[in-house]
Image: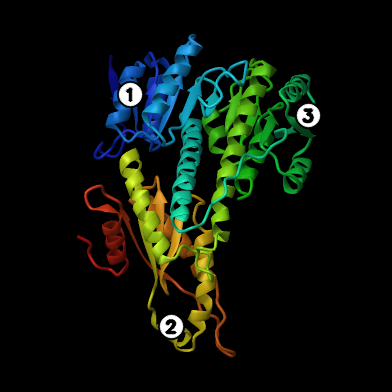
Amino acid sequence: MSVRVYFKGAAGVGLTARVLILAIDDILAEPLARGLDRLGWPSITARGVNAALLALADFPIEAVIVAMTPDAAQDREAALRLKAARGPLRLPILALGAPPRSQGADQGVYDLTLAAPLDPVQAAHRLEQLVRTAVAEEEFVLRSQTFAEHGRRLPHVEPEAGPLRVLTIGEPAPKFLGLSHALKANGAEVTAAFTAYTAFDYLHDRAFDAVVLWGGETQTEALSIAAGMRRNTRLYHLPTLLYLRSSRQADLSEAYRRGLSDVAAADTPESETALRVIDLAKAYRREQAVRRALERARGSGLMDAATGLFTRELFAAHLARLSDSSHGGRRPLAVAVLRIANRPELNSARVGGWLDRALPQIGSMVGRLVRAEDTAALIAPDVYALALPGASEAAAFAAAERISAVIACTAFQAAQGQAPFTVSFDIGAAQVRHEDGAARALERAAMTSLGRKAS
């Protein structure tokens, strides 16, 4: 049994493994581990399942990458043992290798299957998506429990039924047509767009679960389409696969930086590429269902009526539950506080009551600017709190800064004849630590927002 750790970070101080790589040798694992470390996903590599279980117990592992072997049954057993070790908490597992010929064989075992070798940029992008979905699923369970304690049931939302919808973009070359037929054979509903203009018309008018781009003579147009999709907030998370036309190698790191989820080489059989697209589409539907379920909490009747935010009492109960879960599951939890800054130029808006009139709109904006899995609350008339599961203190502070920046660009109505006014925030953030709990972390964040040093 052996466990090897690769740490490549700033000064190597305070880093701990976020990703567990289960691989029998270093051919795939070492370059992937080093690349992930550089991208902020420090990793630990285990040779076998027993070593992997030890690493899972000792490190705050957020996701697992399994390099598949010829023994598919053994790989599935290893993945199931790792998931079971986490108990009720979600452990995303990304399988590295060819997808199974039977999609039912690994149902519920792997969250996503991607082809080897896996580019570190691609891996980091997919890990971020998988971890966010896992955190959102955990949040739904915890939020349902909090709401049940307060006499409300939060209805579960199942992934959308019906055929997966795939948009193919590119000229009708024989290999690309073969992929369309393979997708249809796997039950997908395929819509073909031959140009970028037609593709974006379809993307604007219809909902899809995945997009496949044909490489063509060059990858320039395909990469431009992928980049354009990433500039659209509605399409940002829509999985996109590039199917290469020839054996000429694309710049994979650049392709993934432009927003591609996967790249299929020219010699990849259409049947295998189709299964990879189906896998991506299913993961996307699952992610969307979780986010819809969390959004339904706004209509529960427990939220602040004016803003749709958690009330102070509901937030306190839920934060305590989040804290207990984060300690048990070794998942990070951070909080942030946004306090409307008491600037002199706001005095007239305060005295005239115009700030009070704007507060419901400001609160609603705060709630809309957080992730679906985050909890936003109104804890005082002009103070907002955030609980961010799976986030670090730095990430919580960045989220609060982003919210503040957006709201600072909004002009609110003042008295007739007076110029509209804007608001800014004093911000604080803190990591929830096991030794002092969530309430103390919230106090530290509040002290920071007041410009005071937190102990």
Q: How many neighbours does mark 1 have within 10 angstroms: few (below 14), some (14-19), or many (20 or more)?
A: some
Seen in the picture, residue 2 relative to 311 is either above or below; the reply is above
Q: Residue at x 46, y 62 (%)?
A: 310
Please give the name of the residue rendered at 66% of the width and 35% of the height, measured from the top-left corner. 210
Mark nearer the viewer, 1 or 3: 1
Does dot 2 land on a helix, a strand or a loop?
Answer: helix
Q: Real-space Cα distance between discs 1 and 3?
A: 48 Å
Q: How many residues crowd mark 3 within 10 Å: few (<14), some (14–19), many (20+)?
A: some
On the image, the x and y values in percent for residue 19 come to 38, 31
Does label 1 or label 3 sit earlier along the sequence? Answer: 1
Q: Label 3 belongs to which residue? A: 171
For this orientation, the residue located farthest to the left is 455
**Residue assigned mark 1:** 53
Q: Which residue is mark 2?
A: 345
Q: Residue furthest toward the front?
A: 151
Judge whether 262 appears above or below 340 on screen: above
